[in-house]
Amino acid sequence: MAPHPAILIVDDEPQIRSLLSLAFKRAGFEVRAAPNGGDAVECCSKQAFDVVLSDVRMPGMDGHQLMQWIAVHRPETRTVLMSGYDPKCEGCAYSPRCLVIAKPFKPREVVDAVRHALGA
């Protein structure tokens, strides 16, 4: 893992974005945030990230659609989805390369799961 891995946090809830941004900054990550899938695609088109952490349920492009875009356009980027039970994850062709974190969660649990996904 790079000394300062880059993470993009995608969530339509500003409080969740802020909470996770703070937790990842404190953990030594370079952090960017986006309020939706469309903005995340724009960010990923301009910058490479080690990991994209995204909510599943968002208006417009949801987390699954974002993950599929990343798999095609940024295959080196790890993807982590945050969700309660989500039946779309079962049998998804992209699920083997994606980690799913169940909601509700504690920020420290998310940071630890992302570090583990990055091999740290």
Image: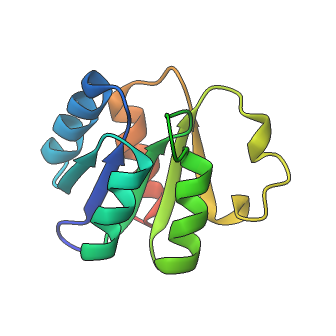
Where 37 sits versus 47, above or below?
A: above
Quadrant occupied by the C terminus: bottom left
In the image: residue 59, left or right of residue 22: right
Looking at the image, can residue 103 be seen? Answer: yes
Q: Residue at x 39, y 62 (%)?
A: 41
Q: Is residue 44 left or right of residue 77?
A: left
Q: Residue at x 33, y 74 (%)?
A: 45
Looking at the rendered image, the quarter that the N terminus falls into is bottom left
Nearer to the camera, 27 or 97: 97
- Above or below, comparing residue 12 to residue 3 in the picture: above
Q: How many marks?
A: 0
Q: Position of residue 69 (x, y in %)?
A: 54, 67
User: In this rendering, is residue 98 above or below 107?
Assistant: below
Q: Position of residue 93 (x, y in %)?
A: 78, 64
- Residue 109 placement (x, y as % from top left): 42, 34
> Image point 20% across, 53% down: which residue?
32
Q: Position of residue 82 (x, y in %)?
A: 52, 37
Tell me which colouring the rendered structure shows: rainbow
Does residue 102 appear left or right of residue 37 in this picture?
A: right
Q: To which quarter of the image does residue 8 belong?
A: bottom left
* Residue that appears at 76% across and 42% down: 88
Q: Nearer the viewer, residue 16 or 34?
A: 34
Q: Residue furthest front?
A: 60
User: Can residue 29 be seen?
Assistant: no
Above or below residue 118? Residue 11 is above
